[in-house]
Amino acid sequence: MIRLILKNHDPAAKTGTNADALNGKGLGREVNKQASEQTLFVRGFIFGSRAERGPTFQDLKPIAALDRRKKKPNGWNTAVGKYAELIYSPKVLESKILDVIARDGKILDVGLGSGIQWLDFCEKHGLDIQKVNLSATSLTDTFHPILKEYGKDVVISDAASLHERFDAGSFDLILSNGSLSRQELSGIENIAHLVKSGGEAIITAKGPMSYEVLIQPLANSNYCELVNYTIPTINDIAPSWSIHIRKS
């Protein structure tokens, strides 16, 4: 596993003793503000022709249903703080989420799973989930019904269609953990499109990924700043990767 913070790298960021990456220290490169504020989604604006749409929603839906039957009813429920363990400790990520909630910022969870993890997160931190500005997506309707009862906006959508479901620049923080479902590059572009100016996205996914395909285009993009990342090595038995991006 290769893990880097692109500037002022401090391994302590994983332990929660240093949150530079979450608090604004990334590439230190000026991002083209006009590019970051575009409202029309154009596929390939970060990854070029590699960002093809991938499988359609109808292709993915039966796969998601099968995956969930192999796990617990109502899907998976990885603790929210563990969404980005490859690059941030639970303490660091939870602190970021709590900061966004304190500002009444809007959060999107792409690939909600059961959603129980958000109830647990709110209980842990003494929050009323009905007052948390949380939206989410799911490929199926097997998320816990209590989320709807609490007024949470859960949209049935795949990652490559997010721009059709939400307005550009809608969210202060977007999280996704293992849910891009073979639409990795298109999913990242959709997520970047939905982050508002000054907002952030932290994404973790399973599978092989290379520096040239994922990291280099993000590092060279005028649309957003690549704050932190990790990519697998060829020797990883169960490869996974994470990225943290910030829009100017």
Image (cartoon, grey):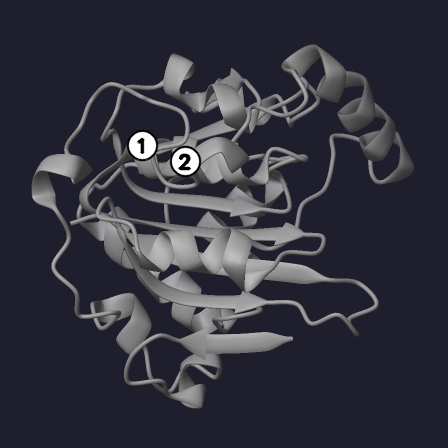
Q: Residue at x 53, y 36 (%)?
A: 50
Q: How many marks?
A: 2
Tag 1: residue type? His
Q: Which of the 4 image quadrants contains residue 68?
A: top right
Q: Is residue 143 visible?
A: yes
Tag 2: residue type? Glu
Q: Is residue 165 above or below residue 222?
A: above
> SS for tag 2?
helix
Please state the horizontal and vertical placement of residue 141, each as a whole percent of the image.
Answer: 66, 17
Which residue position holds label 2?
189
Q: Residue at x 22, y 73 (%)?
A: 25
**Is the residue marked by circle 2 packed among few (<14), some (14-19), or many (20+) residues within 10 Å?**
many
Left or right: residue 224 versus residue 203 is left
Mark-to-mark CA distance, 2 and 1: 6 Å
Where is the N terminus found, in terms of image quarters?
A: bottom right
**Is the residue marked by circle 1 packed among few (<14), some (14-19), or many (20+) residues within 10 Å?**
many
Q: Extreme front residue here?
A: 49
Left or right: residue 202 versus residue 32 is right
Which residue position holds label 1?
193
